[in-house]
Amino acid sequence: MQATWIQPDGSATTLDVPDGCTLMQAATARNLPGIIGECGGSLSCATCHVIVDPGWFARTGAAGPFEDQMLDVAEAERQPTSRLSCQIKMSADLDGIILHIPAV
Ligand code: FES
């Protein structure tokens, strides 16, 4: 399965992501710029903020209540399809997902 991250400058990186791996883990394992994952996925840093491409948002679903609060303190201003990528696990349903890395 694959996911694509698009940088603020428009450059895109597509990575293989194993089933069940979070999109934050996949990005940080390859040192993708803009995704830090400082807290390791424990929902306490918001440095894994991504904007889900609107065409995919119905499949990822919206943030849960605690994630929603964390998005309010993310460095880059949140957008309607913002999510924390440590809370999105790859699955067959998300194969091909496109994520935008917010400009800070
Ligand atoms: S990695 Fe810290 S909130 Fe996602």
Image: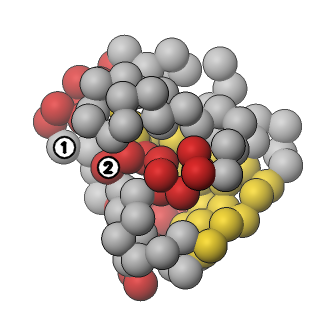
Q: Secondary structure at mark 2?
A: helix
Say which amino acid is labelled 1.
Gly
Residue pictured at 72% horizontal, 50% vertical: 6
Q: Is residue 79 above or below residue 15?
A: above
Residue 7 visible in image: yes
For the C terminus, which image quadrant?
top right
Give ligand 1's quarter of the image: top left
Residue pictured at 54% horizontal, 20% vertical: 76
Q: Position of residue 55 (x, y in %)?
A: 52, 65
- Disc 1 packing (10 Å; few <14; some 14–19; many ≥20): few
Is 29 on the left-hand or right-hand side of 87? right
Residue at label 2? Answer: 87
Residue at label 1? Answer: 64
Residue 49 visible in image: no
- Color theme of the render: secondary structure
- Disc 2 packing (10 Å; few <14; some 14–19; many ≥20): some
Q: Position of residue 40 (x, y in %)?
A: 37, 37
Q: Position of residue 66 (x, y in %)?
A: 17, 32
Say which amino acid is labelled 2.
Gln
Q: Quadrant of residue 3?
A: bottom right
Q: Is residue 9 above or below residue 4?
A: above
Residue pictured at 63% horizontal, 39% vertical: 101
Label located before the other in sequence (2 or 1): 1
Is 66 on the left-hand or right-hand side of 87? left
Which residue is at the front of the view, 51 or 13? 13
What is the spatial separation of the Cα atoms under label 2 and label 1, in whole angstroms? 9 Å
2 vs 1, front mark: 2
Q: Secondary structure at mark 1?
A: loop
Q: Position of residue 10 (x, y in %)?
A: 83, 45
